Image (spheres, rainbow, N blue to C red):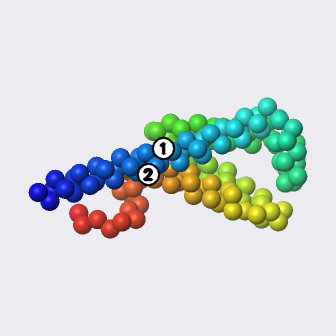
Amino acid sequence: METIQSSATENTTGRSSIIAGTVISVLCILFLLFDAIMKIIRESRSVSGTAQLGWPDSSVQPLGFTLLISTVLYIIPRTKILGAILLTAYLGGATATMVRVGQPLYFSVVFGILVWLGAYLTNKELRNLIPFVKTDK
């Protein structure tokens, strides 16, 4: 009887984790793709915002392509962890830039956390690798 209850609870928890992780991941992906595309097409506000942070105009497109590649890797389930690692590096650079220019850095830090939270909730192997809840197994 206990096995049936724990299995049902685990199944429900797994399903709700996947749904929550998918929603978080999709929201992150949409924002990241929008940002990458705006950089790649050199949209004027994207270029001026990057320049205000101290980056040369010539770096806008390479940053956009870097972000696009990292995001595409994050979208693909088999490469999601690699994508999360690359997005963490990208967002780490964004955080360092914000610190250097004296801007608030919470957005890039929170966004990095959301990227990993989405990956964590949708990837059982990652949850097994980094268990936040002690299991009795």
Q: Residue at x 68, y 56 (%)?
A: 108
Crowd band around label 1 with a 10 angstrom C-alpha radius: few (<14), some (14–19), many (20+):
some
For marks 1 and 2, give the CA distance: 8 Å
Q: Residue at x 28, y 54 (%)?
A: 10
Q: Residue at x 83, y 48 (%)?
A: 50
Picture coordinates of residue 128 (x, y %)? 36, 56
Of 7 and 55, nearer the camera is 7
Residue bearing mark 2: 121
Q: Quadrant of residue 66?
A: top right
Depicted 13 relative to depicted 62: above or below: below
Amino acid carrying mark 1 in the image: Thr
Of 79 and 75, nearer the camera is 75
Q: How many marks?
A: 2
On residue 22, the disc is 1
Amino acid carrying mark 2 in the image: Leu
Depicted 29 relative to depicted 54: above or below: above
On residue 82, the disc is none
Name the image quarter holding the C terminus: bottom left
Depicted 77 relative to depicted 8: above or below: above
Picture coordinates of residue 70 (x, y %)? 61, 42
- In the rendered image, the residue lying farthest to the top is 41
Picture coordinates of residue 98 (x, y %)? 78, 60
Mark 1–mark 2 contact, CB under 8 Å?
yes
Secondary structure found at label 1: helix
Q: Look at the image and tell me whether residue 123 can be seen.
A: no
Name the image quarter holding the N terminus: bottom left
Crowd band around label 2 with a 10 angstrom C-alpha radius: few (<14), some (14–19), many (20+):
many
Secondary structure found at label 2: helix
Q: Residue at x 47, y 48 (%)?
A: 21
Q: Look at the image and tell me whether residue 128 can be seen.
A: yes
